[in-house]
Image (tube, helix red, strand yellow):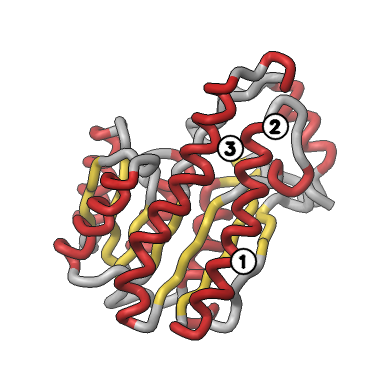
């Protein structure tokens, strides 16, 4: 297992779904973890208790990462609690799926705000301490929709595609400060948040996979752990699908 002892990680949207597993996995590797959430207070509290019961350290910090003041405060909460910030996982996401002709301006703006604007806000805040430390890892969570597009997801696909350019810009700007930035593009990952997807959609995805199973949150978390580690220090600006071959 990669050793993150002495490192501090902040996971946005860390109380549920993929974010929860990412926070758990980073803590298991020795990192102190700040778990950001918006509304899922009980889930965030239970995860903190789980991490602490296993001997780790965790902070829960409520806030809306779409808001500049909240993004800055969440980073400050992390610094106040642990004294540094080494790893930022921009995981918080949201979809409002509908066909373009039915999509409202609010549908577009709200999805863009959480999936793209929030990543900018949190990254901007986190880069300040990382630059001073001359060590940092930015790991953004996108979607294969951002690579290939998806009917009914023009807003979501556009936001996730935008993360490609954003991640590579950060990598170019921060490489000389020993701060890397990479983007993970998960396929269909089965969690409690996606378990209600219509069966015909799931079966259609299965037929396109090159492996014999659907994705799990653990698959994404393991990839985050690697990219957050010292061993991944020579990898930056890359887009890594974690999709069982779905995008090929």
Q: Position of residue 130 (x, y in %)?
A: 35, 74
Q: Are marks 2 and 1 in contact (CB under 8 Å)?
A: no
Mark 1, residue position = 168
Say which label, 3 or 2, has the lower sequence index: 2
Point 71% across, 25% down: residue:
152
Point 75% across, 34% down: residue:
150
Q: Could you tell me if residue 78 is visible in this image?
A: yes
Mark 3, residue position = 190
Q: Position of residue 62 (x, y in %)?
A: 24, 41
**In the structure shown, which secondary structural element does the residue marked by tag 3 occupy?**
strand
Distance, label 2 to label 1, CA atoms, is 22 Å
**How many residues crowd mark 2 within 10 Å: few (<14), some (14–19), many (20+)?**
many
Residue situated in front as seen by the camera: 96 or 40: 96
- In the image: residue 10, left or right of residue 223: left
On screen, residue 203 above or below 112: above
Q: Residue furthest left?
A: 80
Distance, label 3 to label 2, CA atoms, is 22 Å
Point 27% across, 46% down: residue:
69
**How many residues crowd mark 1 within 10 Å: few (<14), some (14–19), many (20+)?**
some
Say which label, 2 or 1, has the lower sequence index: 2
Residue situated in front as seen by the camera: 201 or 103: 103
**In the structure shown, which secondary structural element does the residue marked by tag 2 occupy?**
helix
Distance, label 1 to label 3, CA atoms, is 28 Å
Q: Nearer the viewer, mark 3 or mark 2?
A: 2
Mark 2, residue position = 154
């Amino acid at each position: 297992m990669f050793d993150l002892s002495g490192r501090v990680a902040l996971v946005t949207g860390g109380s549920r779904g993929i974010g929860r597993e990412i926070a758990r996995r980073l803590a298991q590797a020795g990192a102190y973890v700040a778990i950001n959430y918006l509304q899922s207070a009980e889930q965030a509290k239970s995860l903190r208790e789980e991490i602490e019961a296993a001997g780790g350290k965790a902070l829960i910090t409520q806030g809306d990462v779409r808001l500049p003041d909240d993004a800055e405060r969440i980073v400050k909460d992390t610094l106040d609690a642990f004294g540094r910030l080494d790893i930022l996982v921009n995981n918080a996401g949201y979809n409002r799926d509908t066909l373009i002709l039915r999509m409202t301006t609010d549908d577009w703006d709200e999805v863009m705000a959480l999936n793209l604007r929030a990543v900018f806000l949190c990254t901007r805040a986190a880069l300040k301490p990382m630059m001073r430390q001359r060590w940092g890892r930015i790991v953004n969570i996108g979607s294969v929709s951002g690579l290939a597009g998806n009917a009914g997801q023009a807003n979501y696909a556009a936001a996730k595609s935008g993360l490609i350019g954003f991640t590579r810009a950060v990598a170019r700007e921060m490489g000389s400060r020993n701060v890397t930035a990479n983007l993970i593009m998960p396929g269909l990952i089965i969690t409690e948040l996606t378990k209600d997807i219509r069966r015909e959609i799931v079966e259609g995805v299965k037929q396109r996979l090159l492996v014999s199973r659907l994705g799990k949150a653990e698959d994404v978390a393991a990839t985050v752990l690697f990219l957050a580690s010292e061993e991944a220090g020579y990898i930056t600006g890359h887009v890594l699908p974690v999709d069982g071959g779905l995008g090929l």
